[in-house]
Amino acid sequence: MAVLGIAVLASILVPPGWIALITSLFILFLQFKYGFNVIAAMAEGEFQAPSLRDTISGGGYDLVYKQFAIVFFMLIMPGIVATQLAPLLGTLLGIFFLLVLPMSTIVLAREQSLGSALNPVILVTSIYRIGWAYLLVYLYLLMMFASSMTFGQLAFEYLGANGAQVVTAASGYYFALVMYSLMGYMMYQYRHKLDA
């Protein structure tokens, strides 16, 4: 919860501009790093939140860069495929990437390999091994993402831009932590099937 507190404080104290952008990117980086620590802890059956000190002092920063690379790749490739080959193919690739993004994050957390996290055979096989539970978790992840966006929109409507900034930061980081926990717990629950 320390990352959540840092995010809320930064949204209150840092004025808009370049400093706010740099601060936001740093907090996002820290959130991804903390998220991977949450996934790793939950996957090992440790239901205690990792400390912020362990997140900052521990290794594994390369996972954050790899996660940014995965998201960038999954955002750019459907557009390239749609313009270079066929719009329908690009659309289908975009849908595929949306469906496998949580599994890609899980595979990255498990194997710490960019190639494995982008390998469609590994992703589809892992989803198949988990079965319908993956789709259920995926729906929960979508609901949490939508809830975070709804909180931000309602806050902007009722509290104005400054209030919305604080509420959006708090709800966004809270729901992100819950999503990381859910992915880590799915790894823990289906660890025998994923190791097969």
Image: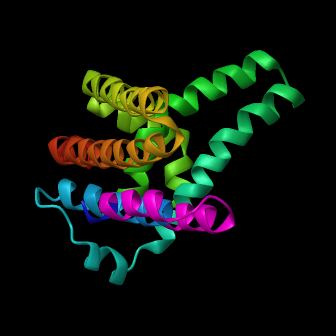
Q: Nearer the viewer, residue 61 or 87?
A: 61
Q: Residue 112: tell me if it is visible.
A: no
- Decide if residue 173 is in sight here: yes
**Quarter in which the N terminus is drawn:** bottom left
Magenta segment's dominant SS is helix
Is 179 above or below relative to 139?
A: below
- How far from the left and from the top, in percent, is residue 79? 77, 32
Q: Position of residue 70 (x, y in %)?
A: 58, 51
At 62% from the left edge and 61% from the top edge, which residue is drawn? 21
Can you tell which quarter of the image residue 124 is in? top left
In-front residue for pair 45/172: 172
Q: Which quarter shows the C terminus?
A: top left
* The magenta stretch spans residue 64: no
Q: Position of residue 3 (x, y in %)?
A: 33, 63
In the rendered structure, the answer to whether residue 46 lies left or right of residue 152 reads: left
Between 92 and 30, the one lying in front of the other is 30
Q: Which residues are magenta?
A: 4-26
Residue 143, located in which quarter of the rendered image? top left
Task: Reply above or below: 46 against 189.
Answer: below
